[in-house]
Each structure stands twice: as C-alpha cells, then as structure tokens.
Image (tube, helix red, strand yellow):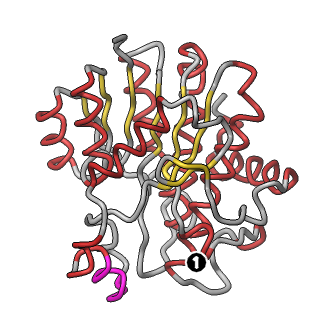
Amino acid sequence: MTQRTILVTGASDGIGAATARALAERGDRVLLTGRSPAKLAAVAASTGGEACPADFARLDDVRALAGWVRERTDRLDVLANNAGGIFAQRAVTVDGNERTLQVNHLAGFLLTNLLLDLVVAARGTVVNTASAAADKYGRLDLMDLDSARSYKPTTAYGNAKFATMLFARSLHGRFGGDGVRAVAIYPGDVASNFAKDTGTTSMKLFYKGPLALFLKTPEDGAANLTWAMESTAARSGETYTERRALPRKRHPQMDDAALADALWAESERRVGFSQEV
C-alpha cells in the first residue's frame, strides 16, 4: 500500500494516540502533536512517529507547529484535527479567545489554513473530530462565541464542536474543486481522560467511572477516524457518526450558508490569518 503522510493532533492520549498506532501499523508516516511532551514522546517512540508538542491554547504554538510540518514534508495526505477539550471554568487565552472555542475550533482552523497548500498538493483529506454534544447543546451565536453572557462547559463544547462540523462543510465548498476532502466524524463515546478537566462529577463518572465499562475503547474511536480518512462512503462536507451518515435529524444550522461564511470570516479575524498569508 502507498505510504501516506498524516498529521494527527491531540495525539498524546486517547483516540489520537490510538489513531497514530493504527496508522503506523498500516505503514503510514505519522506526524504527531499534543499538549503533553512526555506523553507525546511515548506515543512517538511506540509508533516510530515524529513529534512536535503544541498547546492549542496558544496560537503561536500552532504557528510553530505548522512551520515544523513544512520543514518535513511538501504534502499532507491527511490532516486529522482531533485535538479538543471541555473545561469546567471559563477562561480566555493569551490570544483573547474563550479557551473551549480556541482549543476545539480556532487552533484547528488556523493549522488547516496554514497547511492547506500541502493538503491540496496531495489531493488530501481533512478529518475533524466532532461530537454528539454539537447536536445536544450547540446553537452557534456569532455575537457570543466567547460565552461571555453565560458559561456552561457542555454548551461551550457543543458550540465549538458544531463549529468544527461547519468548518468541514465550508472546506468542501471552498476547496473541494482543488481535490480536498473534508469530513467531520463523531467517533463515539470513548473511555478516556477526556473529561478530567470538566469539574463535572457526572461527566467524570461517565468517562472514567463504572459506566466507562460500557463505553468504546480508544481503538474503536480510532477505527472510526481512519474510516473517515479512507472510505469512499464518507462524502466530503458531511458529518458522520461511527461510520454511518448521521441518522438523527440534521443540525438546524448546518445548511445555513450565511452562518458558515460568517463563521469563516470571524475565525480568520480571530487567528489573524489574513495577515499571515
């Protein structure tokens, strides 16, 4: 099989680390990034991957990561925007954005745009990790992207994950003609350290307590991400859940073209991308 060059974000642990292992076993070249240098180094050592730590709560780290990738390759077959998190307390990053929005959406938006020519060169695929929280809690309000009026961890997370879904749809619309595929996928409820920073007892019990026995493994989640990378059944611009087109009612804002365009413009403004290209 042809070796692909794939960048996986959020690769320090959980689904990202399992995805890196699955891709390495397939024979792909894996470039890895994550917030924890020690955990990331361990994943790199076990997969033969190349690693660059980056904290997505700092956009300068994202810019440095993009430069690191460009030093190593002139094409990206897959960019897996898997990094994310849900946080108990509202916080504003050094870049002036609410942390949940930046870590889950804006950092991936910036990284993708900084590396987009490498994806185009490979006629490659961008895969965004989505979440059922987008359907349960997400109703995007461009006038309050920073959750300044009121902050609930699940609502902020749902909105940020819906933004990643809308981003994938916009990528398809803008760059599908250049051969870029863009897919968002909800990998399923996976037992992991995902909710350790929520401060929400119910979510901690759900992901790490006795209920975790009924959750999927990180390897299950990774299988769904790799399916989105490879399967012709995963249509560009769409969001999937566990290898199937979403069976539930479509998110009411998904087909709002004006919202998608406005989110793109606001995301560009917040990451300063127009000044960098």
Query: On screen, 12 above or below 210?
Result: above
Q: As rendered, which of 211 and 38 lies closer to the eye?
A: 211
Which residues are the magenta region?
199-206
Snapshot quadrant of residue 110: top right
Query: On screen, 144 above or below 32?
Result: below
- The quarter of the image holding the C terminus is top right
Q: Residue at x 31, y 41 (%)?
A: 19
Q: Is residue 2 magenta?
A: no
Q: As rendered, which of 66 and 233 lies closer to the eye?
A: 233
Q: Residues within 10 Å of mark 1 (few under 14, many from 20)?
A: many
Q: Regarding mark 1 in the picture, which secondary structure is present there?
A: helix
Snapshot quadrant of residue 1: top left
Q: Residue at x 31, y 51 (%)?
A: 220
Q: Which residue is mark 1?
A: 155
| Horizontal side, residue 82 vs residue 220: left or right | right
Q: Residue at x 65, y 35 (%)?
A: 236
Q: Residue at x 48, y 51 (%)?
A: 129
In the rendering, at what x and y percent does residue 59 appear?
49, 48
In the rendering, at what x and y percent does residue 68 appear?
37, 27
Most distant residue in the right direction: 258
Query: On screen, 239 above or below 172?
Result: below
The main secondary structure of the magenta stretch is helix
Q: What amino acid is found at the position of numbered circle 1 in the picture?
A: Thr
Count of numbered tags: 1
In the rendering, at what x and y percent does residue 243 appear?
49, 46
| Horizontal side, residue 142 vs residue 235: left or right | right
In the rendering, at what x and y percent does residue 144 appear?
72, 73
Snapshot quadrant of residue 87: bottom left
